[in-house]
Image (spheres, rainbow, N blue to C red):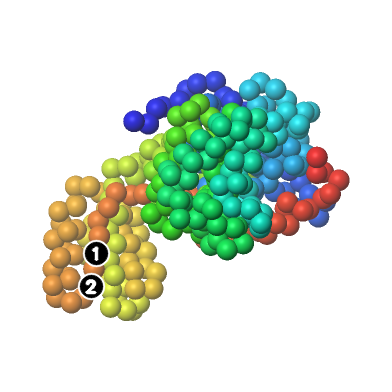
């Protein structure tokens, strides 16, 4: 059962953090957040929203323009070496595995982080089994798929984790079955007492793992709270989605919906999405079933309003910046 740790004292505390680059790019703008031990905290946002830049400042790879970062009460800006000792990070870039096997890489990283030889071997075997990597555990890294390399990088980070764990898009390239296993291991790190900061744009999957989250847009936090808090009034509403034979039919359904809606219908291609109050669920199902029987729609679903719906309402399509540019913006500001 998931424990609720969000009321505890913060292990990571970020206050009014701003990061400017010389070319006028503001990567982070007055960001404040707190993450206690035992919690999975999500950072959601489009590419270029400033998520990776924030992590780089926490771990001491970049220096804030202003604001503060404290890890377990200590000043991480003044002492970036301390931050790197306390933090374990899985970056978005693939780990270099050429010439070593996943098992060797995981054991080596555990030893570097201070584990004894036998402990490192046991932990590597445990993670390989938990993520179903046995078929590739002893295969050289240059022969591995992107998904297996990504999972190996997670295991390298988790083999002997620091008290603060930061994961930058850890599920990229990972197949659906092992993604579920990976989410379980992310949760397990929090249950061990780590504070986990998870960067992702996969809102649907993140909703199952995080206890609190912040939505970033153009470098600013536009919303923060538990998934239930962010849903707000939408928690009592449902999402009706239908697939029409063509885009024109979807537009026609959206322009004159036959079911009472609490927000304007949205058509995108062959799909039409409508938000309805729960009291109208039976009417919506009856209407959709009749439309499918008549051949006017091909399929439909009625589900609770998701965090993804809230996210889209908050940030829309966004105007992503090049986050790589942010990270490489001004060499004079890199710690």
- Looking at the image, is 40 positioned above or below residue 47? above
Residue 102 percent location from the top left of the image? 56, 50
Q: How many marks?
A: 2
Q: Give the quadrant of the N terminus.
A: top left
Residue at point 73%, 51% (across, down): 327
Label 2, secondary structure: give it: loop
Q: CA distance from mark 1 to mark 2?
A: 8 Å
Do the numbered discs 1 and 2 sit on residues whose CB atoms are within 8 Å? yes
**Residue that sits furthest to the right in the current view:** 332
Q: Is residue 194 visible?
A: yes
Q: In the image shown, does 109 or 215 lie closer to the viewer?
A: 109
Identify the residue under disc 2: 297
Residue 17, above or below 299: above
Among the 4 quarters of the image, the one containing residue 47: bottom right
User: Residue 249 at x, y = what percent?
Assistant: 29, 77
Pointer 1 residue: 300
Query: What secondary structure is marked by label 1?
Result: strand
**Residue 292 or 162: which is nearer the viewer?**
162
**Mark 1 nearby-residue class (10 Å; few <14, some 14–19, many ≥20):** some
The residue positioned 80% from the left and 44% from the top of the image is 334
Q: Residue at x 39, y 43 (%)?
A: 208
Q: Is residue 225 left or right of residue 84?
A: left
- 26 or 99: which is nearer to us? 99
Q: Residue at x 50, y 26 (%)?
A: 193
What is the x, y in percent for residue 209?
42, 41
**Number of the label disc, if any, that sits on residue 108:** none
Please give left or right for residue 242 compared with residue 197 in the image.
left
Residue placed most toward the observer, 155 or 307: 155
Residue 149 percent location from the top left of the image: 56, 55
């Amino acid at each position: 059962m998931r424990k609720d740790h969000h009321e505890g004292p913060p292990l990571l505390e970020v206050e009014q953090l701003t990061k400017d680059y010389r070319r006028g790019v503001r990567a982070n703008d007055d960001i404040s957040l707190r993450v206690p031990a035992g919690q999975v905290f999500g950072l959601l946002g489009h590419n270029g929203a400033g998520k990776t830049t924030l992590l780089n400042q926490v771990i001491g790879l970049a220096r804030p323009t202003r604001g503060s970062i404290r890890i377990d009460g200590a000043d991480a800006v003044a002492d970036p070496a301390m931050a790197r000792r306390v933090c374990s990070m899985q970056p978005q870039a693939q780990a270099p595995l050429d010439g070593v096997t996943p098992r060797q890489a995981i054991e080596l990283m555990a030893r570097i982080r201070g584990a004894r030889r036998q402990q490192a071997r046991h932990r590597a075997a445990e993670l390989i089994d938990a993520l179903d990597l046995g078929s590739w555990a002893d295969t050289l890294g240059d022969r591995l798929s992107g998904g297996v390399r990504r999972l190996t990088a997670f295991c390298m980070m988790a083999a002997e984790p620091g008290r603060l764990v930061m994961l930058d898009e850890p599920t990229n390239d990972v197949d659906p079955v092992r993604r579920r296993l990976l989410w379980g291991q992310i949760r397990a790190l929090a249950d061990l007492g780590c504070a986990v900061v998870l960067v992702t744009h996969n809102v649907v999957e993140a909703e199952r793992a995080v206890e609190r989250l912040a939505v970033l847009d153009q470098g600013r936090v536009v919303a923060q709270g538990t998934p239930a808090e962010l849903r707000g009034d939408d928690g009592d509403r449902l999402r009706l989605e239908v697939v029409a034979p063509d885009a024109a039919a979807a537009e026609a359904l959206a322009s004159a919906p036959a079911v009472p809606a609490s927000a304007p219908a949205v058509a995108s291609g062959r799909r039409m999405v409508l938000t309805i109050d729960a009291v109208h669920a039976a009417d919506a199902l009856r209407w959709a079933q009749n439309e499918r029987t008549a051949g006017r729609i091909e399929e439909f679903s009625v589900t609770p309003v998701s965090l993804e719906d809230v996210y889209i309402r908050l940030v829309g399509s966004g105007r992503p910046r090049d986050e790589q540019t942010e990270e490489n913006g001004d060499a004079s500001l890199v710690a």
